[in-house]
Amino acid sequence: MEVAAMLFALLADPNVTYTHNHIFPDVNYNDPLQVNIVNFVASRGYMIGDDRGHFRTNDPISRAVVAVIITEVLDLLSQFQQAAVFTPATGWGFPTAFPDTANHWANGFVWCAVQVGILRGFDDGTFRPDDYVTRAQLAAIFYNTFDRSGAPMGNANFVDVPPTHWAYRAVMNAAVPSW
């Protein structure tokens, strides 16, 4: 739900009531804000739920799924469709940015987001697509995606995010109440 809430805060008009034609059995329809957030991201195709029709509001999200969401938000697949390559074994697909995404279902999404500098791998050259995204990683991804470098930083005190932390600016920016 954190990813959906962050997208809502950055992209939606909070004065609009958004609608979507799917009822997710795991969404609290007694919470108007949660419903509006879910309807916003679902109606735009940013987050559509799982193959069983659940939104999975409390589940962690993998780095691969974040790549898909960011690629959808920025419409990167259509921007990079000329980079798609055809191989007889696999058909159409995108080049590979990391060795551990070569045969991964989200390879094209990861590749597109890497091309625009939003996603990065680890120092060992991997992306780790099936690892859950951390809050620091997510804050950095949104900070880069929406160019929040000039936005104000919050004054929260996170003991696990000292000023020397690699994602300090992004985390402090995400801590701004209006975010």
Image: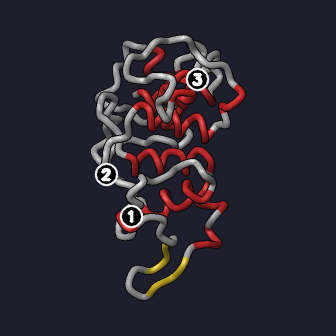
Q: Residue 114 location, x and y as percent? A: 55, 56
- Helix, strand or loop at mark 3: helix
Foreground: disc 2 or disc 3: 3
Q: Amino acid at mark 2?
A: Asp
Between disc 3 and disc 1, whose residue precedes?
1
Above or below, 87 relative to 163: below
The residue tagged 1 is: 101
Structural crowding at the residue carrying mark 3, measured as other residues with C-alpha within 10 Å and reported as few (<14), some (14–19) or many (≥20): many
Q: Residue 13 location, x and y as percent? A: 65, 22
Identity of the residue drawn at 48% across and 25% down:
5
**Count of picture labels:** 3
Q: Is residue 43 left or right of residue 98?
A: right
Q: Quadrant of the C terminus?
A: top right
The residues tagged by marks 3 and 1 sit, at their Cα atoms, a distance apart of 30 Å
Structural crowding at the residue carrying mark 2, measured as other residues with C-alpha within 10 Å and reported as few (<14), some (14–19) or many (≥20): some
Q: Quadrant of the N terminus?
A: top left
- Helix, strand or loop at mark 1: helix
The residues tagged by marks 2 and 3 sit, at their Cα atoms, a distance apart of 26 Å
Identity of the residue drawn at 41% across and 31% down:
135
Indicate which disc residue 130 carries.
2
Identity of the residue drawn at 52% across and 62% down:
111
Identity of the residue drawn at 57% across and 48% down:
118
Indicate which disc residue 173 carries.
3
Observer-nearest of 38 and 142? 142
Residue 133 visible in the current orientation: yes
Q: Amino acid at mark 3?
A: Asn
Q: Amino acid at mark 1?
A: Thr
